[in-house]
Amino acid sequence: MTAALDFALPDTLSAHEPPPVRDGVRLLVSDGEREPTHHRFRDLPELLQPGDLLVVNNSATIPAAIRLDRLSVHFSTAREDGTWLVELRRRTAKASEPYHGGEAGEWLPLPGGATLRLLARETPRLWRASLDQDVLKYLDKYGVPIRYSYVRRDWPLGEYQTVFGTVPGSAEMPSAARPFTADLVTALVARGIGIAPITLHTGVASPEKDEPPYAEWYEVPDWTRRQVEHAGRVIAVGTTVVRALETVAHGGPSSGWTTHLVTPSAGVRVVDGLITGLHEPRSTHLMMLSAIAGEPALTRGYEAALREGYLWHEFGDSHLILGSAARA
């Protein structure tokens, strides 16, 4: 990540709670060499063109956090063998912070008489672990949405769902789609803008700088692939969608586990634009954004977002990138 995309993010620019109107959040538009422009998310139909295709993630958010007296367990990603990747976090007055303890073979008693066994470290932050019950059913009964300290109180699971979410599996909300409403979707379709789904179940966020994303499960339906092939422009709604589409475009299967990392050097093959939130400095997501927008346009966009007081994180404002560097 270059110095141009390493910036100071003031605490005042964190969104602390859901906005009162979903499609009322601000929308920054970065379009090639033009200066960034400022809109509301409900203006999206006028900012796109008939024949554009919005590809959305239909993964729904699960209540992935289990709270103990001193620790929280964040269930991140289901594995093919029935185990899960989990993150252990120390509970604090505001929310939680990374906890670096734990040992392979350790058993953790959970609410409701369940037991979690730590098997092995998958990354410095994540454990491969086994629960003695069906995980999704257990989380539905005892779990709560994952919350970080910049969100000041708990919110119901519905605040972490998107209008497209139909397939439970994401530890954290595919938040780029949160500002969409049923009325906005109707307006987009009436303008001749297509909408097609993929599924990618998101794991827990990566708070450590420069930490690469790990494997996540995805599926790109054949119908969506055909729509992508015939679209005027392909606009991904979220970095998860970019990852899924570009995995397939680079020779991956229509479903499976992806470790694909979109970088400026690799470029993108099918994505012409992206709707996303605002990302933290030096995160790997910024490499993806730079691959689509080009670094000069992305830098101008982030300078404008900081200058104009846009809000970051899952309840924050949005960014429409129409890529000058897309389709390498």
Image (tube, rainbow, N blue to C red):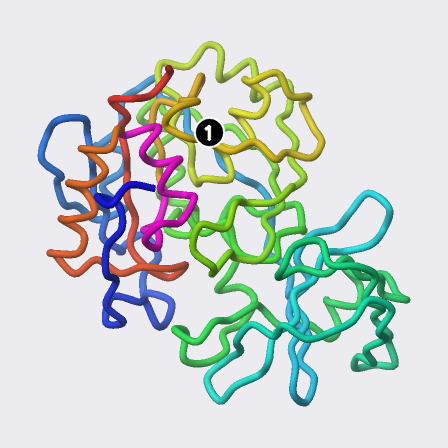
- Could you tell me which quadrant the N terminus lies in? top left
* Quarter containing the C terminus: top left
Q: Is residue 291 inside the magenta stretch?
A: yes
- Residue bearing mark 1: 195
Q: In front here: 110 or 48?
A: 110
The residue lying at 75 percent from left, 50 percent from top is 78
For label 1, count other residues whose C-alpha is less than 10 Å away and answer few (under 14), some (14-19) or many (20+). Answer: some
Q: Quadrant of residue 150?
A: bottom left
The total of numbered circles placed on residues is: 1
Residue at the image point whose x is 40% and y is 38% from the top: 185
Horizontally, residue 97 falls left or right of residue 322, namely right
Q: Is residue 24 left or right of residue 226?
A: left
- 41 horizontally vs 174: left or right: left
Residue 94 lies in the magenta-colored region: no
Residue 241 image offset from top left, x and y in percent: 50, 35
The local secondary structure at tag 1 comes to: strand
- Please tell me whether residue 100 is drawn above or below residue 113 in the rendered image: above
In the rendered image, the vertical position of residue 195 relative to residue 110, given as above or below: above
Q: Residue at x 37, y 45 (%)?
A: 183
Residue range (magenta): 276-293
Closer to the camera, 56 or 276? 276
Residue 130, how many percent across, how many down? Answer: 84, 62
**Residue type (three-letter) at the residue carrying disc 1:** Ile
Q: Position of residue 37 (x, y in %)?
A: 12, 40
Query: Image point 13% across, 39% down: which residue?
Result: 36
Q: Quadrant of residue 248?
A: top right
